[in-house]
Image (cartoon, rainbow, N blue to C red):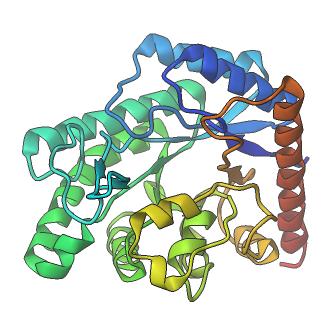
Amino acid sequence: MLTTSVNTDYNNDLHDWNAIEHQVEHIAKAGFTHTQWIHDWEGEYLYSKSEMFQARDVLSYYGLKAHTIHASEGGQRDLFDAQGRKVPHVRERCTRIRKDYTNPNEYLRLAGVDLIKNRFDLCSHIGAKAMVLHMQLPFGMFRRSSSDMEDYYQQVYKSFDEVQPYAKAAGVKIALENLLFTPVEYELDKFERLFQRYDFDFLGLCYDSGHASIMCQDNYYLYLEKYHDRLCVTHLQDTDSVPREKLDDDVVVVQADAHRVPFTGVLDWQKIAYWVARAPLEMPADFEIGLKYNQSFESEKEEMDLLSDCHERALKFHQLVLNEKELL
């Protein structure tokens, strides 16, 4: 059976259960079998137990299975530059995040651990087996001071050491995502450090194809080639990439991360299917797309047409993976 999965925030991440249920309902109507639960992924919001049951019951009512979820960064990092543009605060350590498992302030680091545990609890309630997690690297600080970089990772190690028993008891993996903005050498160092320290029962890779198409200018498939044996989640989306000389312009990079449906941009989906087929990832592969994001659809038909088109592309990709598996 061909299975398919798409993000529950394909149109918006409004803090509103009506908006959440609307998107879940339409995902099911379009024919998807699974979903990645992505809501409140950027702030410090903690789900109550009753909300976890609500998420479980909403998915069950519409006949959807929770494949994975997206954890939260613990707070918004955006700042405004001299031109008044909103830009991510990622090059330096963002110590104002109140629930950040990498924070040098021990109270805020522990609050970040609590937030991660809250999302493990959500996984347990809705049946998801993997949780995507961002690890924003303050690479500007890393470039200036190797000792500050080691201090940063010591906080990460403490947090992961503390949550690892909790995750394993819940039967849920963390999937570290390849991110925007951070130069490839620092992302590779992140994965090398953490994959050497933690086993696959606890920690794997979330491959974001759109991020890779922007940041990995020499090889969009680098993380798949190096770490396909750790692949447990995907964020499949397409982009037009950006010129190499624009990589230091964070606004341009954010705008390029368009979350278009696969097969519409620069990526070779046959090559991605090749590596997914050789990975331990449990299908379906999650699509992470934006359909008129934060805009209103002109009609119910427009929304369903766009979602149905996305579903057909998800079926196409799953078939590519099955074809590759037959060659193994």
| Residue furthest out toward the bottom | 218
Q: How many labels does the image show?
A: 0
The foreground one among 164 and 317 is 317
Residue name at image x 22 percent, y 42 percent: 97
Where residue 110 sits, quadrant-wise, is top left
The foreground one among 113 and 185 is 185
In the rendering, at what x and y percent does residue 112 appear? 25, 40
Is residue 51 found left or right of 188 in the rendered image?
right
Vertical comparison of 25 with 254: above or below = above
Is residue 278 found left or right of 244 in the rendered image?
right
The foreground one among 96 and 2 is 96
Q: Quadrant of the C terminus?
A: bottom right
Is residue 63 something one can see in this rendering?
yes
Is residue 327 found left or right of 144 in the rendered image?
right
In the rendering, at what x and y percent does residue 327 appear? 88, 78
| Residue furthest out toward the front | 83
In the rendering, at what x and y percent does residue 177 appear? 48, 60
Residue name at image x 70 percent, y 20 percent: 22
In the rendering, at what x and y percent does residue 324 appear? 85, 73
Residue name at image x 28 percent, y 50 percent: 79
Vertical comparison of 121 with 278: above or below = above
Vertical comparison of 175 with 198: above or below = above
Residue name at image x 31 percent, y 32 percent: 44
Is residue 179 something one can see in this rendering?
no
